[in-house]
Image (cartoon, rainbow, N blue to C red):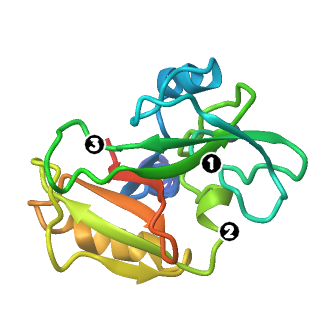
Amino acid sequence: MRRNRIERAGVRRLANWQQRRPLMHIQALPTDLVRHWQAGGADAHGQRPEPAISDGNGNPCRHCLNLIPQGAGYLIVAHRPFHSLQPYAECGPLFVCADACTRFEDHGTLPEALKSSPDFLIKGYGRNERIIYGTGTIVTPEEMPARVADIFTDPQIAFIHVRSARNNCYQARIDRTP
Ligand SMILES: [Zn+2]
């Protein structure tokens, strides 16, 4: 009887663990970088962030991963979400809140920014930060976790980038669960 209770508790713990720890771990931009822009620091092109006011029409912040509310200030910057400078290290525009927002922490559910569009482009990269061809796919938010898990079955894949399906803007990085 006692043993059965322990076994049942173990199964419950495993179920909770799996709910909290899916195969994907979503990474928003680092806070120190975003604070640098929010303080007027230069972007990847050496330019000051451009201030703008959100129309509330789907402007996602890449730090809190929420949609920037209508009337709220935000910054437009050029960013290269790679460590290495090489032909695959794309640089492009993205938005962050103008005010100091709180970085998204992945507790197992998709952030608002990754549910706000009907679909997204995801693609896998190797350790050398180059695209692993064949991984690029357009997915709905609902399809994303399963497709990410599928891409991560290839040991060559070091990380995955999520971009907007229509404008190719960088949204977030996904790593394997630590
Ligand atoms: Zn934000």
In the picture, residue 64 is in which quadrant?
top right
In this view, the residue in front, 68 or 114, is 68
Residue labelled with disc 1: 65
In the rendered image, residue 59, in percent from the top left (x then y), is placed at 70, 57
Tell me if mark 1 has few (under 14), some (14-19) or many (20+) residues whose alpha carbon lies within 10 angstroms of its own. many
Tell which circle, 1 or 2, labels the residue nearer the N-terminal end.
Answer: 1
In the rendered image, residue 50, in percent from the top left (x then y), is placed at 64, 38
SS label for mark 1: loop
Tell me if mark 2 has few (under 14), some (14-19) or many (20+) residues whose alpha carbon lies within 10 angstroms of its own. some
SS label for mark 3: loop
Is 99 situated left or right of 166 in this image?
right
SS label for mark 2: loop
Is residue 25 in sight in this rendering? no
| Residue that appears at 23% across and 75% down | 135
Above or below 151: residue 104:
above
**Which corner quadrant holds the C terminus?**
top left
In this view, the residue in front, 73 or 32, is 73
Residue behind label 1 places its C-beta within 8 angstroms of ligand 1: yes
Determine contact: label 3, label 1, CB under 8 Å: no
The amino acid marked with disc number 3 is Phe
Residue labelled with disc 2: 116
Residue behind label 2 places its C-beta within 8 angstroms of ligand 1: no
Is 60 situated left or right of 30 in this image?
right
Image quarter for ligand 1 equals top right
Tell which circle, 2 or 3, labels the residue nearer the N-terminal end.
Answer: 3
Above or below 46: residue 4:
below
Number of disc labels = 3
Nearer to us: label 3 or label 1: 3
